[in-house]
Image (cartoon, grey):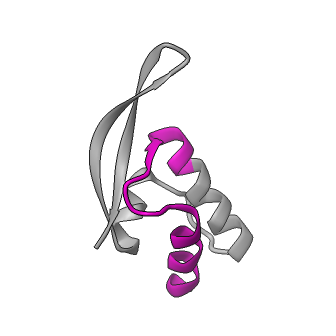
Amino acid sequence: MENKIIYELNKLYPTGIRITNKDLKRSIQDIYDRLGYKAHAKGTDILKYGYLTKKVKIRIDGKRVDGVELAKI
């Protein structure tokens, strides 16, 4: 199951992409649901699947929101 999750995440998130915490959590939950994985997604789950994160602020509609920049290990 973990390999399928990693494969799906690698398709969605190349190295260097910036994403809001909210969007990241939603994406991980969508993958869990599609694959039938019975877990509640957390933003930190991305660390289990071979990514490093760096906290960043992302400007959306003139507002700064919390997010992460992703890098693969």
- Against 42, residue 7 (above or below) is below
Task: State the image coordinates of residue 46 (x, y, percent, origin top left).
Answer: 41, 62
Q: Where is residue 40 in the image (x, y as percent from the top left)?
A: 55, 58
- Residue drawn at x 47%, y 39% as measured from the top left: 20
Point out the stretch of residues depicted in magenta.
1-25
Total of numbered circles in the picture?
A: 0
Picture coordinates of residue 3, whole percent (x, y): 51, 86
Corner quadrant of residue 67? top left
Q: Is residue 8 magenta?
A: yes
Query: Is 6 located above or below residue 66 in the figure?
Result: below
Residue at the image position 39 percent from the left and 62 percent from the top: 15
Left or right, residue 35 beside residue 19: right
State the image quarter where residue 34 is shown. bottom right
* Quadrant where the C terminus is found in the figure: bottom left
Characterize the magenta stretch by its predominant secondary structure. Answer: helix
Task: Say which residue appears at 58% left-offset and 83% top-offset.
Answer: 4
How far across and down, in percent of the image, does residue 65 sit? 42, 26
The one of 5 and 38 positioned closer to us in this rendering: 5
Q: In which quarter of the image is the N terminus?
A: bottom right
